[in-house]
Image: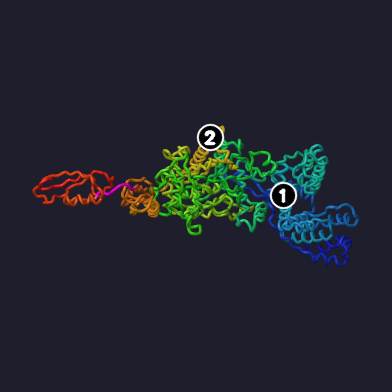
Amino acid sequence: MSVVAGVLVTATVTPAVALAGVAANQSIGVFDGLPDYLEVDKLSEKSNIYATGSDGPQLLASFYVENRVEVPLDRIAQAAKDAAVSGEDPRFYDHGGVDLPGTLRAVAQTYVLGNDVQGGSSITQQYVKNVLVEKAVRNISDDAERAAAIDEATRTSPERKLREMKLAIGLEKQYTKDQILQGYLNIAFFGGTTYGLETAANYYYATSAADLSIAQAASLIAIVNNPAVLRIDQPDNPDNGAANGYARNKDRRDYIIGKMLEEGKISQEDHDAAVATPIEPRITQPSTGCSTAGNAGFFCDYVTNVLKNNEIFGADEDTRWTNFRRGGLDVYTTLDVGLQDAAVAAVDAQVPQTWNFDVGAVSVSVEVGSGRVLAMTQNKKYSQDPDVLTTDPSYSAVNYSTDRANGGSSGIQPGSTYKLFTLVEWLKEGHSINESVDGTRKSTWGTFTDSCVSGGTDTSNETSAKNDEGGTGEVGTPVSFTKTSLNTGFVGMARELDLCGIRDTAVDMGVKQGSGEELEHNPSSVLGTNYVSPLSMAGAFATIASGGTTCDPVAIDRITDSAGADQPVPPANCRQSIDRNVAATAAVALQATFTGGGTAVASRTGDGVPLIGKTGTTDDAKATWMTGASTRVATAVGVFNVKGDANLRLGRYSFDSGSAATARHRIWPVVMRAADATYGGTAFPEADGSLQVVPKVDIPDVVGLSSADAEAKLEAAGFGVVQGGTEASDAAVGTVTRADPSGSAPRGTAITVFTSSGNQKTVPNVTGQDLEAAKNAFGAAGFTKITLACAEDPKAPDAGQVTGQEPAGGSPVAPDATLKVTITAKKCP
């Protein structure tokens, strides 16, 4: 606008400026000194989270501070554009940002005559005011500063009016009229949390801005004039409600329709029909928050926590969450709707939402090799409403699948599924899956190697590992121990490993405490006493299935902004955490659980897709698990006592569907069959031959050692030790008399050790001696009972010669034993 226009504007408001204490001859200078440039930022828009459906993205939930969907002018009905211009600023396309006649009228009424505040602001001026408010709300974090900025943008004062005019004039130089009108219709406030015409059309009339009728368009534009008074979502309002046909809104609506006729935008017929149309809102509540995500509420909650926690989305949690709710983002997640529905149905069919105790159940599936979370469900309905949570135990705000940082608990004990990490560490340290290991139960397990502690040794002796039904255990192999989940077998394996190494292997495979603390690495931890998330355990089994590649869980495939441009997403950080040969060999043992006598037989899918898996049961069966994978999908299923009360053992209860302790086996195969049907699966790679062959090593000579020293020497050489009992010997009582086998054997072989009970003498070896010398030797050894057998031979020595003896020389016998000697002589005595 020209300087002349500026002078005209200044002249218009000079009386008001004078009242404000500014001399009239200074008003032009005041106006010239005001800023004339306004940067229009991107508007706040709602963001959406989508799942992956068979027919494309499926909306889970929307989030917003201001519920707004920005649309271009060509997606707004002409009736709405005409209603806005005719009702708010008929000379919009003629003036340069300020409607001088309207402004003069408003100034005279408000500031000169002192009447009620009058309108008169052009559409451009209203747009300026809304932009300033939006800037204050979006960019100022301090509450007091934000309130001051909003007050400055909205208060009734000549100073604010002058500033608004100057910025409106500047804005008209930056943008076309259509651009300003589009911005105005998208930024306008329509009451509550409804912003922009598109959202208003959706909310109030269940339609789009493009499909608004004349009556609907005028009704919505009417709200903009005074949203608190003219909104039409309060049917019980006595002044503007359903009983009086929303009278206040109708008055303003009909005024706007009349202005549309006056401006030649509609015909008399259209006018009459629109005025005769009753106001009948079709209020459509927007989807907001994860409570609207249906059976995917907990997954939705997990996604929101990823958005809050990941630094890729902002400097701190508040900034990240605000950016998301204002950013107009479309978040396309990894959730597979089909697999999610199958998992939900499986859990719902087997585990009730409430029971005699606080029962929990969870099923979570991830894609092998990518970390994409495909399904996540539990036996509760999702809510964050405190009133609901305190009154209805079928709801929960805690996501059982994840860790605390991502909306979950502090973790759940995984039981024997955690034995996976001892198996992997066993192979990493060069052992074979076919080595013999002493897995018999012991009253004391002695010391364990632990390089994480000072001195490198765990001397707590705190594990009292027991087997199911009090079994004594056996000497077996890692394959047999995995198949039957023998506790003492895995403790026996751990004794030959580094406890710190087992812990580090779990960490490398993506597992940590649900609380965020480091994993424990004491002997008992081998059996699954750490508290971890089911999601991380599914990821660990996916590591085996992928050939040793561990990926961070990924919930988001893609994010686009309101213009459709791709935005950064958290990476999977896939890395080779264990050697491929180790993974392939571990898979051999984990497949054995599905064979006859294995603990996972009840979870067979029967669809022909090869599987690995491991069961888990904690002390008192307070938590039961089935976790495993195909080469495409890994799934962890758990049924547990949420509060962990030892008096509420799962094995004591049955749901309508069957035993609580075996519900996992009625869920896991259903979920995996659905996964197999979609993703398939191939055979697992062949195991590394070097990790299956058992090399032989020399067995140390322990004869003459004490039992304790012999055991220590054999174990140090990699052998197990079994006490064979005592036997009569002339060796010192308690010393080792023999070991079986001796010589060499595969590492891990159990060596049976026998010790002396005393009370025996050793028979001298007299073969080849003459008879007299033999008698003297026997006498010196204390033997007095001797029988003689003789054969005559002319060629025999003159003194005769011993040709045989029983027992043989070196044999231990009782002191009063009768010894038999055979001799040859020229003439027998």
User: Which stretch is magenta?
Assistant: 758-763
Q: What residue lies at 56% left-to-right and 48% top-to-bottom? A: 531
Q: Residue furthest right?
A: 113
Q: Residue furthest top?
A: 656
Label 1, secondary structure: give it: loop
Q: What is the chief secondary structure element of the magenta stretch? A: strand
- How would you rate the neighbour count of disc 1 (Cα within 10 Å): few for under 14, some for 14-19, many for 20 or more? many
Give the percent coordinates (x, y) of residue 822: 17, 45
User: Which residue lies under the disc numbered 1?
Assistant: 196
Q: What residue lies at 56% left-to-right and 51% top-to-bottom? A: 513
**Can you tell which quarter of the image residue 472 is in?**
top left
- How would you rate the neighbour count of disc 2 (Cα within 10 Å): few for under 14, some for 14-19, many for 20 or more? some
Q: Is residue 473 magenta?
A: no
- For this view, does 401 lie left or right of residue 780? right
Give the percent coordinates (x, y) of residue 476: 40, 45
Label 2, secondary structure: give it: strand
Viewer-closest of 25 and 99: 25
User: Which residue lies under the disc numbered 2?
Assistant: 659
Q: What residue lies at 68% left-to-right and 56% top-to-bottom? A: 42
Q: Is residue 762 magenta?
A: yes
Viewer-closest of 115 and 1: 115
Is residue 392 visible in the rendered image? The answer is yes
- For this view, does 456 lie left or right of residue 360? left
